[in-house]
Image: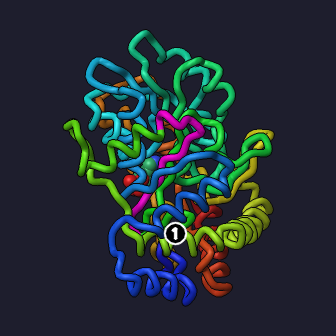
């Protein structure tokens, strides 16, 4: 069975983790500071704070903006429930907005309709590896948190995603583009906001007391993150190569392959096709290929809301097939043949 996703860990990664373990520093230390420096210089931002997950980074980003009970945070409905959790941790209300049917990203026009006096922030994920309409959302005049959990290394108008939001967050979960097992980072050019995020993370040895959060990353995770980051360009190149192979095969069958809008690229964190999940997933499973719904359940579904036609359509008709640097040639052939067969049937 070819799994839907699989981390890529090589001997160099293991060596770097080993060195970090041998250093005797197991908790947050020099490697964490160096990982923050490395990612910030790669993305082109000034400050970064590594944390224990992407969700933790989102929570601290919202907290640093002063989000709390009585506030609202706009999020796309077509995304994982981590965003709902991060908003709810602060006591604020999550307000889902509909998506662009072409890229599955937040729709700026629907977002504008959901904004009101209580809106504290907008979380903008760049889903599946291609950027959302960031400038249109930023122009709405509400603080924007870019969510780059799925888009590290993708470009928007010539700059990396994560370089324009007031705060941006990353996830290094085991099967993300680069992995530290669990992990995340918040980055920003705003020194004051980052000071606040760091203060919330460094909970001990303070003169004052307020609720702070033990969201720290360990040094051996950071060592792995640094090693993975060095391979990011090669990871992306390989993802694009595989996507190119899938595109060629499916294009010949007239299947709509993943698209994006002008002024941005695609790193193919996910390869999403417009097919009904129930039948497609079963057919692929029978041919030895593990596929998934790209989003388990839209957020408006959890909240009992209605009025999200593009999200509903995407949920009813989208599937995610395996695409990751560790796929070997045989596996790529198997996935391609299985997709061809399943797409011609379904
Ligand atoms: C778009 C998006 N944002 C945030 C998260 C949360 O990241 P983590 O799993 O590291 O908490 C995820 C992860 O699954 C995600 O896909």
Compared to 228, does 68 lie above or below?
Answer: above
Decide: few, some or many residues near mark 1? Use Cα within 10 Å; few <14, some 14-19, many ≥20.
many
Q: Is residue 64 left or right of residue 14?
A: left
Q: Is residue 148 left or right of residue 261?
A: left
Q: Position of residue 260 (x, y in %)?
A: 72, 45
Q: Is residue 301 left or right of residue 135?
A: left
Q: Position of residue 66 (x, y in %)?
A: 36, 26
Q: Ligand 1 within 8 A of label 1's CB?
A: no
Q: Secondary structure at mark 1?
A: helix
Compared to 63, does 331 lie above or below?
Answer: below
Viewer-proximal residue, 84 or 16?
16
Q: Would you identify the image quadrant in which residue 133 lies? A: top right
Viewer-proximal residue, 166 or 124?
166
| Total tally of numbered discs in the picture | 1
Compared to 97, does 104 lie above or below?
Answer: below
**Residue drawn 54% across and 65% down?**
34
- State the residue lying farthest toward the top: 117
Q: Indicate yes or no whether the magenta region holds residue 151.
A: no
Residue 270 visible somewhere in the drawing: no
Q: How is the image coloured?
A: rainbow
Q: Indicate yes or no whether the magenta region holds residue 191.
A: yes
Q: Position of residue 333 (x, y in %)?
A: 67, 81
Viewer-proximal residue, 29 or 325?
29
Q: Is residue 148 left or right of residue 154?
A: left
**Residue drawn 25% across and 29% down?**
91
The magenta segment:
181-193
Q: Which residue is mark 1?
A: 225
Residue 122 visible somewhere in the drawing: yes
Viewer-proximal residue, 346 or 265?
265
Q: Position of residue 203 (x, y in %)?
A: 26, 48
**Residue drawn 54% across and 42% down?**
168
**Residue drawn 59% across and 35% down?**
165
């Amino acid at each position: 069975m070819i799994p839907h996703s699989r981390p890529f860990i090589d001997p160099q990664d293991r060596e770097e983790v080993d060195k970090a373990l041998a250093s005797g520093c197991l908790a947050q230390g020099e490697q964490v500071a160096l990982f923050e420096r490395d990612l910030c210089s790669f993305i082109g931002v000034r400050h970064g704070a590594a944390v224990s997950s992407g969700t933790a980074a989102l929570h601290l980003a919202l907290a640093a903006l002063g989000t709390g009970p009585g506030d609202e945070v706009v999020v796309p409905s077509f995304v994982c429930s981590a965003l709902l959790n991060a908003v709810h941790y602060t006591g604020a209300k999550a307000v889902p907005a509909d998506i662009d049917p072409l890229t599955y990203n937040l729709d700026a026009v629907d977002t504008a309709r959901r904004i009101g006096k209580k809106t504290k922030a907008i979380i903008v994920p760049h889903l599946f590896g291609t950027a959302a309409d960031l400038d249109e959302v930023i122009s709405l005049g509400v603080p924007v948190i870019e969510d780059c959990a799925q888009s590290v290394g993708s470009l928007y108008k010539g700059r990396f995603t994560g370089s324009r939001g007031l705060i941006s967050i990353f996830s290094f979960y085991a099967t993300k583009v680069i992995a530290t097992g669990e992990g995340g980072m918040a980055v920003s050019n705003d020194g004051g906001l980052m000071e606040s995020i760091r203060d919330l993370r460094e909970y001990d040895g303070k003169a004052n007391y307020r609720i702070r959060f033990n969201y720290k990353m360990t040094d051996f995770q950071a060592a792995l993150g640094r090693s993975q980051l060095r391979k990011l360009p090669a990871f992306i190149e390989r993802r694009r190569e595989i996507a190119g192979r899938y595109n060629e095969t499916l294009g010949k069958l007239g299947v709509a392959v993943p698209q994006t809008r002008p002024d941005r690229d695609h790193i193919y964190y996910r390869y999403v096709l417009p097919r009904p999940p129930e039948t497609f997933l079963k057919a692929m499973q029978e041919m030895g290929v593990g596929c998934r719904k790209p989003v388990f359940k839209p957020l408006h579904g959890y909240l009992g809301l209605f009025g999200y036609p593009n999200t509903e359509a995407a949920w009813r008709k989208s599937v995610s097939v395996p695409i990751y640097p560790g796929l070997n040639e045989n596996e790529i052939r198997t996935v391609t043949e299985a997709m061809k067969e399943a797409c011609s049937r379904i």
